[in-house]
Amino acid sequence: MGDADRIIDDLLARRCEWQTMEVKSAHDGSPKVYDTLSSFSNQQDGGVIVFGVDESNGYKLVGVFDPQQLQKDIVEQGKEMTPEVRPTFEVCERDGLILVLAYVASVPMSRRPVYRTTTGVTKGSYVRSGDQDLRMTPAELYEIDAFKGGLRNDLDVPAVSDRTMLSADKVDQFVLKAKDNRPHMAHRPEDEVLGLTGATRGGRPTLAGLMTLSDYPQQALPNLCVTAVAVAGTTMAQDDFGNRFLDNKRLEGPIDEMIESTMAFVRRNTKSKVVIVDGKRHDVPEYPENAVREVVTNALMHRDYGPYNNGTPTRIVIYSNRLECWNPGGIYGGQSVDDLGYTNIQTRNPTLVSLLEIQGVAENRHSGIPVIRDEMRRAGLRPPVFIDKRGTFTVRLFNDPEVTQSNSGDGARKVDEDELLAFCAVPRSRAEIAEHFGAQASYVAHNYLKPLVESGALSMTLPEKPRSKFQRFIATR
């Protein structure tokens, strides 16, 4: 079965569009697809446009008016984009009707945004969100320009920044560590060390300098803090007494203090269990502390500090079943979640990272994500979930155990069906679903996939071949 057949099977099983799928009738002529050409080009996975399917008629196959002319027209639309979009095509027959698939490749971040030339960058640049093509926001356009132009927001000097805002004690400790760790700094005076490391520019503290060496950087940058809340259930809803939060704190100070304050908040609002090893008592936290620390440190270190987001705090939410950390700024440079921990991703805030490294607060070794994964695995918990969505980044740590061959029987944890359906918003194989939930494929298939298919909540892309290795599962609601 070729790609076209598999794609059409997926589409007909799900009967809706999604992140990498757009449907057009093209039965009576060539539709305009400038917005979709833009949005697919501007996302990491690209996308495919299927012509010859009528969305308004329950995704009925209708065929295209003229496959050759349609391809010519779409090529011409691609020429009207900046940079030019050159889709590749596949023509296939299904039920006696001709369908055309246009594959749109991702464009590297260095060449984005892709936009319709006559409309211009601000009005003609689109991003995909689910089944919609949405116009890029100024913040999204700025992030692309910042990457292409090498803009360094951590080196910005806030308007109210003043040398007196830096803590004398923090500066003394920082300079000593910088001289110890970097031989070229050893014989330089304090102000020169601060300038060479990027803590100051022209004698005034940079954003990076304030966030690391000021007792209270929020005097200049009031919303660069952490907001932390704990709630009773699995959603941000009120309890029976009208309370939304069990605990609610605004955590301020330099980054090292915000990390410690956040860790204290997490300890206070999560459980621990006692384990006796060799006759000695050990308190085991609900979430591995090293994993939580890496999550918080990475959020504050790699978040977007640009002009569209420097008024937005980093957020920590503790639910009954998970801990979530959210920060503004997606994965820098347009790489995907699948690259995290496996490839070297460029650093958004290299000066800030360097200052934190000198302080001993963080490392600059791209080791944070592997540590989070490893700590969760060693604790017997399910793998962390990383979400990169429209210029934001979220990490989810769950407190239920990873399902393995030894614990996948009656005592295994329950997979959250709503999360499974959300994960299957795009077609997923048994192996993908099992890996996501840290479970055996046979356990997930028997206990969840089969019942959800029978209830109609999930559909199989190949219902006539339920055991096919090409089988995929798609949420129908």
Image (cartoon, grey):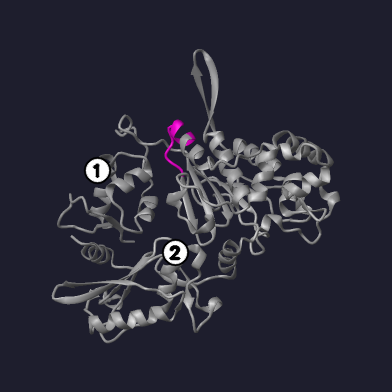
Q: Position of residue 231 (x, y in %)?
A: 56, 46
Q: Residue drawn at (84%, 54%), measured in percent from left and top?
A: 162
Q: What span is colored magenta in the figure? A: 375-384
Q: Position of residue 277 (x, y in %)?
A: 49, 17
* Residue 84 seen in render: yes
- Residue of label 1: 446
Mark 1 to mark 2 CA distance (whole Å) = 35 Å
| Figure check: 429 above or below 85 | above
| Figure check: 222 above or below 55 | above
- Residue of label 2: 43
Q: Residue drawn at (43%, 61%), measured in percent from left and top?
A: 44
Q: Position of residue 406 (x, y in %)?
A: 31, 29
Residue 66 vs residue 424, the one in the foreground: 66
Q: As drawn, is 78 to the left or to the right of 471?
A: right
Secondary structure under badge 2?
loop
* Residue 245 seen in render: no
